[in-house]
Image (tube, rainbow, N blue to C red):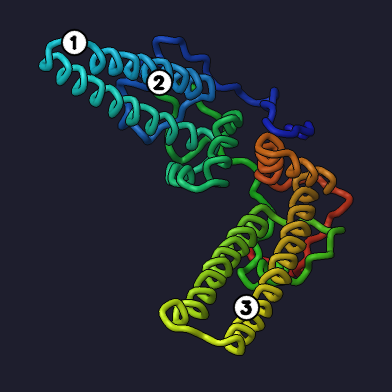
Amino acid sequence: MNDRVYYFIKPYDESLPLPPAESFAQILNEAYLHPFNWKARTTRKSFWWSTLINLVIGILCILLGFYAFNQNINPGIRIVDGIVAAVVYLWLFLAALGQTIRRLHDVGYSGYWYWAAFTGYGAMFLFYLELQPSVQRQVKWGKYLFSDQDYPKGGAKSNVPVPTIGQILKEHFFDCFKWDARSTRTSFWVGTAISQVIMTIGVFACYLLAFMLLAPFSVTEFDSGDAKVIGVIFIIFIIFFIAAAIWAFLAQLGHTVRRLHDAGFNGGWWWLGVIPYVGQLLLAFLLFHPTVQNEVKWDKYLFDPEDRIR
C-alpha cells in the first residue's frame, strides 16, 4: 500500500507491478495506427511522447501551409498542400483522441471524461489525470496494446461517503464557517458548479433588470421622479447582489478549506489561488486529489454517518 505523501503527482507503489516500458516504435504504432482502438489503456510515457510528436507535426504542417500560400507556386500544388494538411490535422486529432481515452482508462476513468476538456476546470482536471501514474490494478477497459502485462484485480473498496444533493447544498451554502472538518471531492465540485451557475444567472439578471428599467425610457422622456424610483430599485438590487457575492465567496472559501483537509492538506494552501494562473492551477491540482484513506486531524464530515450514501 502506497501511503507516501504527495502534492501534485502521485508516486508509484513499488510493491506492485510497474507499467510496461514501450519502445518508441510501439508508441508510434499505438498512437497513429490504432486511433480507434479505445478499449485499451496506455502508459503516461506513451501519451506524452505522442502529444509531443503531434505538436511537432502540427507545427510542420503550419509552416508548410504558410509556404504554400505565400509563394508564387502552382495553384494546383496549393490545393494539394491544403488537402494533405487537412488530412494530417484530422489524423492527428483522431490519434490524440484515442491516446487520451486510453490514458483515462489507464488511470481508472471512463473515456467520457474527455468531454470535460470543453470546460475550464474540466480541462484542468483532464490535465491532472493525464499527469498521474497508471493505476496498478486491472481496469474494465482492457490491457495495454503492446504488452500482456496485467495488474492484480480490483483493490480495496472505497469507503468515501457520497452525500446527497441536499447535503451538498447545505454544506456549501450554510456551513461557510465550519472549517474544522473535511469534504469529499464530489461534494466540493458539485457545490462549486451549482454556485457558479447561480452566480452566472445573477449576473444575467442584473443586465436584464437594467434593460427592463431603462429600455422604456430610451425612446420617451422621463422626469426626475422616475429617475429616482429607478435609481432606488437598482441600488437595492445591486446591494442584494453584492451581499450574495460575498456569501458565495465565503461559502466557496469554507468548502475549499474542507476539501484541502480531506486531501490531507492544511487549509492555508488556499492562498495558492491568489497567485494568477500558476497558483490557481496548482490549487486546482490539490483540490482534485482523492480523499486520503488515513486519518487526518480534521477527520469529520458535516453530514451524519447514517445519512451517507455509500
What residue is pinned by disc 3? 234
- The residue closer to the viewer here, 80 or 41, is 80
Q: Is residue 264 left or right of residue 8?
A: right
Residue 83 numbered mark, or none: none
Amino acid at dot 1: Asn
Gap between marks 2 and 3 measured at Cα: 53 Å
- Does residue 190 lie above or below 104 as drawn? below
What residue is pinned by disc 1? 72
Residue 54 numbered mark, or none: 2
Amino acid at dot 3: Phe
Please tell me how many numbered marks the rendered image carries. Answer: 3
> Could you tell me residue 249's position as x and y percent?
73, 61
Q: Residue at x 69, y 37 (%)?
A: 282
Q: Secondary structure at mark 1?
A: loop
Gap between marks 2 and 1 measured at Cα: 29 Å
- The residue closer to the viewer here, 99 or 3, is 99
Disc 2 crowd, CA 10 A, few/some/many (<14, 14-19, 20+)? many
Q: Earlier in the sequence, mark 2 or mark 1?
A: 2
Q: Quick one: which residue is furthest to the right in this view?
A: 297
Q: Secondary structure at mark 3?
A: helix
Q: Residue at x 10, y 16 (%)?
A: 76
Q: Residue at x 59, y 30 (%)?
A: 131
> Could you tell me residue 201's position as x and y percent?
54, 68
